[in-house]
Image (spheres, helix red, strand yellow):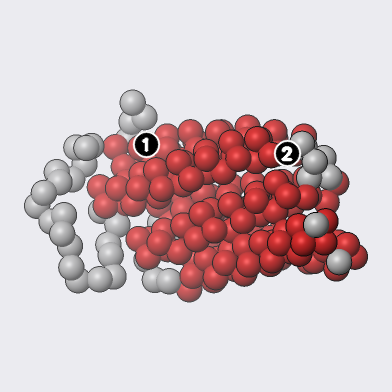
Amino acid sequence: MKSLLDVTIWIVLIAHLLMALAAAWRVWRGENSISRLAGLDLASTLTLAILVIISIIRANIIYIDVAIAAAALSYISTIALAKYISDHKVF
Amino acid sequence: METILQFLAFLLIVSGTLLSLIGVIGFIRLPDVYTRLHATGKVSVFGLVFLLLAADILTPLATWKALLLIFFVLAASPTVSHAISSAAYRAGIPMVGKRDDLKGKMELGKGG
């Protein structure tokens, strides 16, 4: 069971990296700015998932702290960018 | 007991990854912004939360921090999706479907 879990978690890490690459492709070649913003949100969510997977692989809790900080930052930045794109002002 | 917990974590990791994969495929294949936002909700609500539950089981001492991040993700992800779709409607991004319940009820370009 342990070795199966070890192999699976590496496959899952590579799958999440490929999915983040797809989201980054949408940010690079989006048809409008809101579509790129949705791709950015997806890429930040997948970054959180990759940090959690690394925390499982290394059996270390510190990566979940990094994920909490990254979640707070991406939340604020996505809300601010959406407000700026629709209204041309932030506040 | 240890084996049962590891098997549960295995199931959580595999199902979370498959649901994330469904969300990303929908994000690539669907036609406009609103339907794509519908697909990306799967990635944060199912994929990330299942991975965090697996980390909760496997990593020692991770219980309360993982639960905190689950609470934060479940609070933040619908808010972000709503903000992006509202910004898309107010910026005048066209939608594929014909039905528009907000037509005439929201002043375009004025904020809201």
Identify the residue position indicated by label 2 in the image: B62
Q: Amino acid at mark 2?
A: Ala
**Same chain assignment for discs 1 and 2:** no
Q: Quadrant of the C terminus of chain A?
A: top left
Q: Amino acid at mark 1?
A: Tyr
Identify the residue position indicated by label 1 in the image: A84
Pinpoint residue A62: horizontal percent, then vertical percent: 77, 34
Is the residue under label 2 in contact with that under label 1 (CB below 8 Å)?
no
Q: Is residue A67 visible?
A: no
Q: Give me the residue at 37% from left, 65% from top.
A: B35
Looking at the picture, tell me which residue is in the foreground, B41 or A77. Answer: B41
Mark 1 crowd level (few <14, some 14–19, many ≥20, 10 Å Cα):
some
Pinpoint residue B33: horizontal percent, then vertical percent: 38, 60
Q: Quadrant of the N terminus of chain A?
A: bottom right
Q: Secondary structure at mark 1?
A: helix
Q: Give me the residue at 62% from left, 56% from top.
A: B50
Above or below, B108 relative to A91: below
Q: Is residue B105 left or right of residue A75?
A: left
Frontmost of labels 1 and 2 is 2
Outermost top residue = A91
